[in-house]
Amino acid sequence: MVEERKPRFDAPIPGMSLTHELGARPWQQPAQFVTVDEVVDHYTSRMMNNDEFADQLVDVMEMGIPLTTIANTIQLAGVMEGKHSVDTGLLSLPIIIETMMLIGDSAGVKYNTGMEDAPKSSSETMARRNVEKLYQDDMKKENKDNEVMNDIIEEEQTVEPVVEEEEPMGLMQRRS
């Protein structure tokens, strides 16, 4: 039984997100922290003075999530809250990462900074493996085709062709 599709009247209208009043979102307001020093002070004081944050950060570090990812997430959330602009957040990233490394070192946790020359991403290595496999399969097929062609050529050289002469037929034939 095929179910009839009913129109959804509660779905957002296309372009609805662009209809909010200018300045209604936090990131559209002037930033709370304007300079990089203010942004760095904000984050380092929050990280160093909050034991709950440090405990959660240590747990996340133990999971193996790169510090660069964590720091970028933290600064992006600050941009979305209107704490600072994107550029001051990006300029403060190295110091945020260093602060997280200090917390990890003091907790004795082995962490992934995300800045060392790690093996390429799994999707990139997977793509490389797939390409190599396709290449090897193609080479095997080509070798197999070459063997078949060589066999055909050898057979043609060993077998002498038998040519039968046909008598011409039809209106245009030569008379003998």
Image (spheres, rainbow, N blue to C red):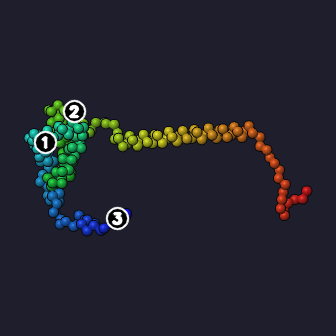
Judge the density around disc 3: few (<14), some (14-19), many (≥20) Cα neighbours within 10 Å: few
With 148 as the anchor, is 114 left or right in this view? left
| Label ID, residue 1 | none
Q: Quadrant of residue 158?
A: top right
Q: In the image shown, does 150 or 48 lie closer to the viewer?
A: 150
Residue 88: x %, y % from top left: 18, 50
Amino acid at pointer 3 = Glu
How far is disc 2 from disc 3 in space, using C-alphas?
Answer: 55 Å
Instruction: Indicate the secondary structure of the residue bearing disc 2.
Output: loop
Instruction: Indicate the secondary structure of the residue bearing disc 3.
Output: loop
Q: In the image shown, does 2 or 35 lie closer to the viewer?
A: 2
Comes first in the chain, label 3 or label 1: 3
Q: Is residue 95 among what the camera can see?
A: no
Outermost residue toward the front in this view: 1
Residue 75: x %, y % from top left: 19, 48
Residue visible at 70% across and 39% down? 155
Residue 25: x %, y % from top left: 16, 60
Residue visible at 9% across and 41% down? 50
Up the image or down, 175 lies above or below 66; here it is: below
Work out which quarter of the rendered image holds the C terminus and state it.
Answer: bottom right
Residue placed under numbered mark 2 in the picture: 110
Residue visible at 57% across and 38% down? 143
| Label ID, residue 53 | 1
Amino acid at pointer 2 = Lys
How far is disc 2 from disc 1 in space, using C-alphas?
Answer: 17 Å
Of circles 3 and 1, which is in front? 3
Comes first in the chain, label 2 or label 3: 3
Residue visible at 13% across and 42% down? 53
Work out which quarter of the rendered image holds the N terminus and state it.
Answer: bottom left
